Each structure stands twice: as structure tokens, then as C-alpha cells.
Image: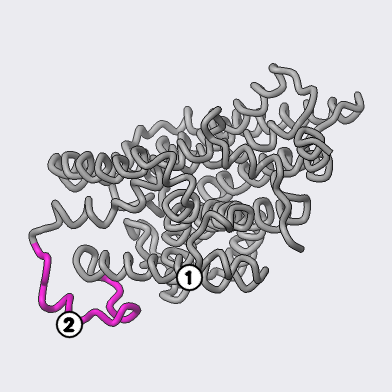
Amino acid sequence: MDQNSKVNLQEEKKGKWIISRNYDLSWLIAPGLVSIIIVLIAHQFDFPKEVIPGSGRTDGKALPPWLWLLLIPGVDVSHVYSTLFRAYLDREVWTRKKTLLTLTPLFCFVFALILYSFGKLVFWSAVAYLAVFHFIRQQYGFLSLYIRKEKNTQGISILWDKITLYAVTILPVLYWHLTPDTRRFEWFMEGDFFYFPNEILARSVHILFWIWVFLYSLSQVYFLLNKKEISWGKILLLVNTSSVWYVGIVFLNDDFAFTLTNVINHGVPYIALVFAYSSFRRKSLPSLFYSAFQKGILVLLPFVFVLVLLAFSEEWLWDSFVWREHSDLFGNKSVIRSELGLGFEFILVPLFFLPQFTHYILDGFLWKGGKDNNELRDFLGFQKLDS
């Protein structure tokens, strides 16, 4: 069997799923939907009772400490470091894209330094909008992968899918900007968004969101009735995305709901995608991980351990030298009392933000299709995970 025949056979087995039906449903789609169910149930029982309206930055003041530790270092920050397996720990990628992987952190650090020189609020406002863009683009990236799996899809249908993805994410964020008086959470810190209060426009945006969802649903029913092929992974991704952004931002509007839905739906699928990629690319990883990946499920141990260790270390630095708010979790009271780093936030903040900033930028290159993105093309075309 020639190489092209093998590719076609693998594509046929994978169907319209990125990895496989079970893997996609379990790790790319379900996390967001499960997080919605959790926050809706929690809302009925008034959990967590520590929620403080207008508590400012999403820093855990409105979350039980154990939950903050699980969501922020455990998922959110950990997913940032999974980029290491997609880029820096992949020998082939590092060799071919050494310039990009070397210059990006340098650029990010210098840019962050310049940005912070304009003031703390300017910096966090800029990175908040960058984060919003990154979160939206990740969902767009997953959608693009599903679209690439569809055959005989017309250009207008693809455009309709992509515009819908942007609509169901941007409209809730726009609603957020139009309703500052009712906001009970922030993205990074209080005042990082620019608000334009307008009740009438906010209601219009709310109505437009549901009109858009209704029209898109009708279009998919039309495709089904006309026996046109549709990708259930794509549909479920859009259901997942619209639900998470609407429930977390508009419907419940509290720090717990926003943080849990936002973090879980963004972090878990990304880690799962990188894990699948690393399983496929294990021969290009360092020997420690190569041997572990060959042992199937046991690879989760070194994989997750590395991510959590790096994430916890970063959050320890943030708390010890910048935020100084979670000494009971990090055991850093003595460091905080010594006031080390006080007055050096102008360099510490850009430095500590470097992994996240680098992740934002590299993510736009590493998962984008292109002639030179051989490892991604091979991963999507030949992917086969051990059961």
C-alpha cells in the first residue's frame, strides 16, 4: 500500500473527528459542557458561599482555596506549559523553527517591559484583551480542524460556521462591556476592561445572540433534512463554546461560574490535544518522555507532573513577589514578610508573565496549517492513539 493510500485509510477511520470520536467527546467537548452542569447545580445550592460581588481580580477571593488551586495552577497555568511538548521538547520542531522559538520569548519580554512602563492598569488591560482574543482563537482553531475533516463542504457553509464561532464568543464579551454595573467579576483585575454602559444596546446584543443561535440551528436542521454531511464534532464544539461563554458571562455572572467554565473549557481540551500530539510524536521527545509514552497511560504521570510542577512554581513566584495573597497555600509567609522584590514589579511582572505571553503568540503559529507545518499535517492525517 502506497503512502497516499495509507493517509486515506487513516482519514477514513478517523472520520470527521480530530483524534477519534471517543477521544474528542471525552476531552475536547465534554469538559466545557460538564463545567456548565457543575456551575448550574452549584448555583442552585448557592456555592461557593464565599462569593463576594465586585471582588475585583479573579484571584480566588470568590473561590475556596482548594478550588482556586485546582483551577488556576492545576489547569489554567498548566495548559500554558503544555506548549513545551508542542514546541521546545519536540526535537524536529525545535530544529526547524529554532528562530521562531528563540525570538518569540525575547520579543514578548521586551514588549511586556515597554507595556508595563505605561502603568500597571495599561499592562493588565492590554493583556486582558490579548487573553480574550487568544481564548476565542483557540475555539476557532478547534473549529478549523473540524472543518478540515469535512468533505465537499461549500465555502459559504465554512464561512457561516466561522462567523458563528465569532458571534457566540464576541457577543457575550460585548454584553460584558455594556453592563459594568451588574458585573461581579473581572478578567485579570478590576478595571482591566473599558466599559461602555448602555442598557438598550446590551439588551439588543443579548437578543442578537439568541437570534444567531436559532438561525444557525435552523441551518444545521436544513442540512440534515437534505441529507448533507455534517460534522457532529463541529456542531458539538459550537454548542460547547456558545454555552460556556453565555452561561459563564451572561446568565450566571459570577466569579465562580466564569472562572470554572472559562478555565476548564480552555485548559483541559488544549492539554488533551497536546497529549495526543505528544503521543503521536513521542520519538521526537527527550528520552525520558519517549520511554514513558511507550508505556501507554503511564505517560500521564510524567506529563502531568511536569505541567503541574512548572505551574505551581510560577504561581509561587507570583504570590511571593507580586500578589502576596495565598501564603497559606504556598507556604511563603516568610518570603512575603521580607518584602523581597518590592518596587521591582516593573520587571518581575513582565518576567513572570513571559510563559503565558509566549504561549499566546506561539499558539498562533504552531497550530496553524501551512506547507512548513509538517508535524501538524502528519499528526492530523496519521493520528492513531493507543486505546
281 left or right, relative to 53: right
| Residue at mark 1 | 70
Q: Residue at x 50, y 69 (%)?
A: 288
The quadrant the C terminus occupies is bottom right
Question: In the image, residue 155 lies at what x, y percent?
Answer: 69, 17
Q: Nearer the viewer, residue 178 or 26?
A: 26
Mark 2 nearby-residue class (10 Å; few <14, some 14–19, many ≥20)? few
Question: Which residue, as the protein is rendered here, is positioned at the far left?
Answer: 343
- Between residues 84 and 332, which one lies in front from this camera angle? 84
Q: Is residue 171 visible?
A: no
**Quarter-of-image position of residue 13:** top right
Q: Depth check: give the residue in front, 315 or 381.
A: 381
Q: Position of residue 255 (x, y in %)?
A: 45, 58
Q: Amino acid at mark 1?
A: Leu
Q: Residue at x 61, y 40 (%)?
A: 142
Which of marks 2 and 1 precedes in the sequence?
Answer: 1
Relative horizontal placement of residue 127, taking residue 234 as reference (left or right): left
Give the distance between the C-alpha atoms of the residues marked 1 and 2, in whole angstroms.
24 Å
Q: Are marks 1 and 2 in contact (CB under 8 Å)?
A: no
The answer to which quarter of the image holds residue 282 is bottom right
Residue shown at 40% from the left, 71% from the top: 309
The stretch of residues the image draws in magenta is 325-342
Inspect the magenta stretch and tell me whether residue 214 lies in it. Answer: no
Determine whether 134 is above or below 196 in the image.
below
Q: Position of residue 321 (x, y in %)?
A: 19, 66
Q: Which residue is mark 2?
A: 334
